[in-house]
Amino acid sequence: MGKTVLVTGASSGIGKATAIYLAQNGYNVYGAARRVEKMQDLKTYGIHPIALDVTKEESMVACVEQMLKEAGSIDILINNAGSGYYGALEDMPMADAKYQIEVNVFGVARLIQLVLPTMRKNNYGKIVNISSVGGKVTLPMGAWYHASKFAIEGLSDALRKEVKPFGVDVIVIEPGGTKSEMTALGDEYMTGVSGNTVYSSLAKGVSKMYATMQKDAADPIVIAKLIKQGIEATHPKTRYAGAAGAKLILFLRKILSDKLFDRLIMSQMK
């Protein structure tokens, strides 16, 4: 049996593709999500579906304890579960903003806390945090989403220095446009929150851009392969970027001034 992996958010999108791909390549995979009923098909790949709500302490503790009891270790943690609410900052209820940070940042951090003792004991571990191109680049209507992904970038950089002496690697994955139900849900939420406010025309522009991006969006398997590349590297890179437009947009962000980049982004909203 290969290394034991916990993949969060495994009921769809990148999480599901990654769980299947790693299982097909000899890993002992636990696919975790709130919607266990949506993961029953994963059993055909030898994946263990496990209930996990990253906003609930007791759920995270129970998930990790069950895995340690059954598998003896958690060698690789892939923090993929995420929330993608979009809407103007002025319009978004703070309760929804807090939920997004809870899922995208605090849930990630708490799971890391729970798996690290075993990883340190074994002097081996891979912690993969799924960020986004949106952890480096921002779109209007995405203030809280981007805040959470920028936070993941910083958290990962600090953590990497802390755990390296214990044989634990921290890897950040920055997907670009990837086929996902989260995009449609985020767009629907944005229309509900900002579709009839002073930001309605901007919301329409962002929605139109999303529709264009989804046409070119990459299959999640592209990200699954990047993750496998990272966890199997003897000396993994700190970051891997991939899927539609990722490398180009990150390059442009690096070479353009803030104001020039803003103009470039806003030109896509028309």
Image (spheres, rainbow, N blue to C red):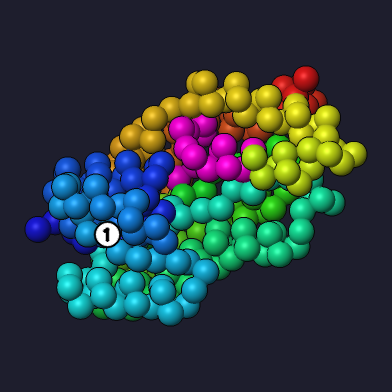
Q: Is residue 42 left or right of residue 157?
A: left
Q: Is residue 199 left or right of residue 125?
A: right
The answer to which of 18 and 184 lies nearer the viewer is 184
- Residue occupying image coordinates x 41% and y 73%: 60
Q: Is residue 162 visible?
A: no
Q: Residues within 10 Å of mark 1 (few under 14, many from 20)?
A: many
- Residue occupying image coordinates x 35% and y 66%: 51
Residue that numbered label 1 is attached to = 49
**Residue ranking furthest to the left:** 1
- Residue occupying image coordinates x 17% and y 70%: 71
Q: Identify the secondary structure beneath mark 1.
A: strand
**Residue ranking furthest to the front:** 37
Say which quadrant the N terminus sits in: bottom left
- Residue occupying image coordinates x 46% and y 55%: 81
Residue 259 position, x and y percent, is 82, 32
Name which residue type carries label 1. Pro
Relative to 270, residue 186 above or below:
below
Is 143 inside the magenta-drawn segment? no
Q: Is residue 204 left or right of residue 20?
A: right
Q: How many marks?
A: 1
Q: Is residue 117 left or right of residue 184?
A: left
Magenta-drawn segment: 173-187
Q: Is residue 145 visible?
A: yes
